[in-house]
């Protein structure tokens, strides 16, 4: 198996990307990694070249670049060359912690879509209180969506949860303003009717306040609402830990208490750590494409590589392709 990685994408590139790649090679058999980026900068941190090669790239797509224009103009950028490796079938999957919009554009224009998928979805796995996590899609790849798009998201998310996350008969919920049937706007009402007939374990509407309680294994929504929900969860977790830290640092007594609870607090933080779940998959593309968090450290990159490997090993793309085709045939009949 071969994975191509944009070594120049993200806040801590290329150091953390290189360290994550070396860890993956150490832990995963039969894996070959191509690091795409500035050769000299990569070699500064690459201390083990076993099953790792470098593809030199002269350009970098930054967070300030306009996504579509950057992909079209910066042909020699690390992100574009990475996607080309997948297109030419020299790599089975690719990963970047760089510009999300540019990765989406490269996925669409270079890697290509699965036949029958109208719009790919950006799909991270988010933490739950029981530590199992849930998949949410879409969280921003498409701000607007049609009911048929949400149906496709549900099918793709269910397949991923079952094949990669090993969840038997995963529960699929539709994010809404209430749990009752008939709730919501025109989009959610129409999507609800489609999801009831889909080849998935649809459990109905779910509310945002119940997401971290594990109310569903897969949560479906449009990219606008999904992105707001994602940022709210991230912001709340960050604010919560800031308040806890401030409280424990307020006096000598609380500092002593913090010392005693250090291990427990770290365990709590790890439970809410996105890096333990890998990156966000761009589901609906012709090969696995993973968007790692922009602030990913080597641990997050390692987990994103594991995630990509699972998607390849369990033929997630082919299963999605076959299920979508079968569902379309059923609808036509």
Image (spheres, rainbow, N blue to C red):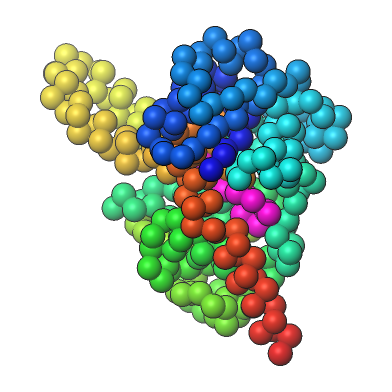
Q: Which residues are magenta?
A: 278-288
- Can you tell which quarter of the image residue 2 is in? top right
Q: Residue at x 34, y 53 (%)?
A: 132
Q: In the rendered picture of this protein, how many numbered marks are placed on residues?
A: 0
In percent of width and height, residue 169 lies at 41, 71
In percent of width and height, residue 102 lies at 73, 37
Viewer-closest of 326 and 129: 326
Q: Residue furthest bottom?
A: 333
Viewer-closest of 53 and 147: 53
Is residue 317 rendered to the left or right of residue 332?
Answer: left
Asked if residue 213 shows in the view, the reply is yes
Is residue 285 rendered to the left or right of residue 262?
Answer: right
Question: Is residue 16 highlighted in magenta?
Answer: no
- Can you tell which quarter of the image residue 320 is in? bottom right
Q: Is residue 122 above or below residue 55?
A: below
In percent of width and height, residue 219 lies at 50, 61
Image quadrant holding the C terminus, namely: bottom right
Question: Is residue 280 highlighted in magenta?
Answer: yes
- Can you tell which quarter of the image residue 25 is in? top left
Q: Is residue 276 above or below residue 253?
A: below
Q: Residue at x 63, y 10 (%)?
A: 40
Q: Residue at x 64, y 51 (%)?
A: 287
Viewer-closest of 242 and 71: 71
Looking at the magenta stretch, what is its main secondary structure?
loop
Asked if residue 300 shows in the view, the reply is no
């Amino acid at each position: 198996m071969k994975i191509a990685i944009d070594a120049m994408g993200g806040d801590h590139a290329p150091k953390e990307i290189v360290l994550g790649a070396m860890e993956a090679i150490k832990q995963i058999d039969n894996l070959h990694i191509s690091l795409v980026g500035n050769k000299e900068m990569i070699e500064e941190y690459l201390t083990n070249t076993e099953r790792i090669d470098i593809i030199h790239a002269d350009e970098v797509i930054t967070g300030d670049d306009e996504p579509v224009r950057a992909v079209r103009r910066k042909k020699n950028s690390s992100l574009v060359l990475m996607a080309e490796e997948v297109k030419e079938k020299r790599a089975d999957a690719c990963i970047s912690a760089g510009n999300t919009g540019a990765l989406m554009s490269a996925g669409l224009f270079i890697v290509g879509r699965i036949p029958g998928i109208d719009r790919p979805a950006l799909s991270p796995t988010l933490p739950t209180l029981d530590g199992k996590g849930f998949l949410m899609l879409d969280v921003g790849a498409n701000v607007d969506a049609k009911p048929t798009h949400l149906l496709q998201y549900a099918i793709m998310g269910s397949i991923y949860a079952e094949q990669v996350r090993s969840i038997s008969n995963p529960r699929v919920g539709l994010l809404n303003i209430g749990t009752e049937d008939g709730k919501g706007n025109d989009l959610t009402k129409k999507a609800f009717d489609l999801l009831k007939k889909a080849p998935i374990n649809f459990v109905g509407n779910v509310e945002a306040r119940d997401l971290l309680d594990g109310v569903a294994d897969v949560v479906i929504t449009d990219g606008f609402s999904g992105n707001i929900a994602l940022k709210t969860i991230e912001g709340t977790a960050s604010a919560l830990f800031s308040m806890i830290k401030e409280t424990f640092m307020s006096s000598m007594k609380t500092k002593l208490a913090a010392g005693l609870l250090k291990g427990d607090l770290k365990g709590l933080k790890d439970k809410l750590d996105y890096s333990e779940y890998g990156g966000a998959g761009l589901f609906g593309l012709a090969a696995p494409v993973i968007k790692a968090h922009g602030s990913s450290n080597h641990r997050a990159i390692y987990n994103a590589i594991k995630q990509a490997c699972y998607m390849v090993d369990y033929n997630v793309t082919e299963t999605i392709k076959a299920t979508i085709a079968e569902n379309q045939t059923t609808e036509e009949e």
